[in-house]
Amino acid sequence: MKRKAIVVSIKGLVLTNKERKLLSKENPWGLILFKRNIKSIKQIKSLINSIKLSVNDINFPILIDEEGSAVSRLRNIANHNVSAQYFGNLYLINKNLSIQMYKEYLNSLCNILKKIGININTIPVIDILRNNTNKVIGNRSFSSKKKIVKHFGQITVNQCHLNKVISVIKHIPGHGCTSSDSHYKMPKVKLSYRDLKNKDFFPFKNSSAKLAMTAHILYQKIDPINPATFSKIIIKNIIRNKIGFKGILMSDDISMKALKYDLVTNAKKSLDAGCNLVLYCAGNINDNFKLIKSVPFIDNFTYKKTSEIYKILR
């Protein structure tokens, strides 16, 4: 499994010749799809089949952000107009019903993903709602109550794995504590480590997830210089040691404006800090090639953890 430490993206509804070459010759770890890549069930199944043929791997990691409600890449072919917060609010009224309904929702969602060939969904969002939480998180979060968020997070991981779909917990170590949107600028958090540990970090602690996605956030009291994605302090001391995450750590999209460097530098800083994979979502073919030639092959740790993912998918 000689793969490059990157998840790439494509521009349109069908693979171009250059995109086929990217997949067949450059060996990315995986590929993420967006609404721009999806028009109909027939079309997306054909596209995914082309991707898997290009890499000669039926279990090649194909990712999507299908959270439902505000973030639904499958909106053209499926109706998932229900938010995480809906289930969190229902939990306060009827715990058993909310869990039953959420599991049924996940079963239905995973069934659709498997039918079209997607095997990794970047859920759950286990950021905690705070009074100042930016609307970019909003109803994507289950609750302002940390135990409810953690509970639904673990249900998501377990239920997805039962359905042979891999989940991705995000945005580690927590995005709910900021009023800014990292798609547009660097969010800065002034809370102490103690405040963050007791609330925002809690849902991520000792998760059994195989994958996690970082937050492009500057936690000023922990590392005043580097956002979490670039921070050896946060990745090693907080995410790995304190939170205890043992899976593959993937950056959030390195083309987001929170990261101020060029793409190649953003990728290098992410990997140097301790991310195992970088995520590139803009789909520009020239940037895809530039990035994939700049990043290393996955290390032994990532290889081992990828093998664990493949065992679930079989």
Image: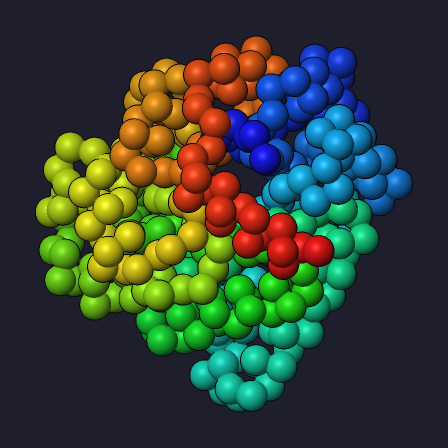
Q: Residue 34, percent across and down?
A: 64, 37
Residue at coordinates 63% horizontally, 42% vertically from top-left? Answer: 61
Q: Is residue 98 left or right of residue 185?
A: right
Residue at coordinates 61% horizontally, 73% vertically from top-left? Answer: 102
Q: Residue 218, percent across and down?
A: 22, 40
Q: How many numbered circles are shown?
A: 0
Q: Is residue 236 left or right of residue 157?
A: left
Location of residue 288 with respect to 50 vertically, above or below:
above
Q: Quadrant of the C terminus?
A: bottom right
> Would you identify the image quadrant in which residue 52 lies?
top right
Q: Residue 275, percent across and down?
A: 36, 38
In the picture as drawn, the residue positioned furthest to the right comes out as: 42
Q: Quadrant of the N terminus?
A: top right
> Is residue 284 visible to the viewer in this orientation of the structure?
no
Q: Residue 131, percent across and down?
A: 29, 61
> Would you identify the image quadrant in which residue 39 lies?
top right
> Is residue 59 visible to the viewer in this orientation of the structure?
yes
Q: Is residue 174 left or right of residue 285?
A: left
Towards the viewer: 58 or 74 = 58
Residue at coordinates 50% horizontally, 41% vertically from top-left? Answer: 303
Colour scheme in the image?
A: rainbow
Residue at coordinates 55% horizontally, 54% vertically from top-left? Answer: 308
Q: Is residue 49 left or right of residue 176?
A: right
Location of residue 11 with respect to 73 vertically, above or below:
above
Location of residue 282 with respect to 162 vertically, above or below:
above
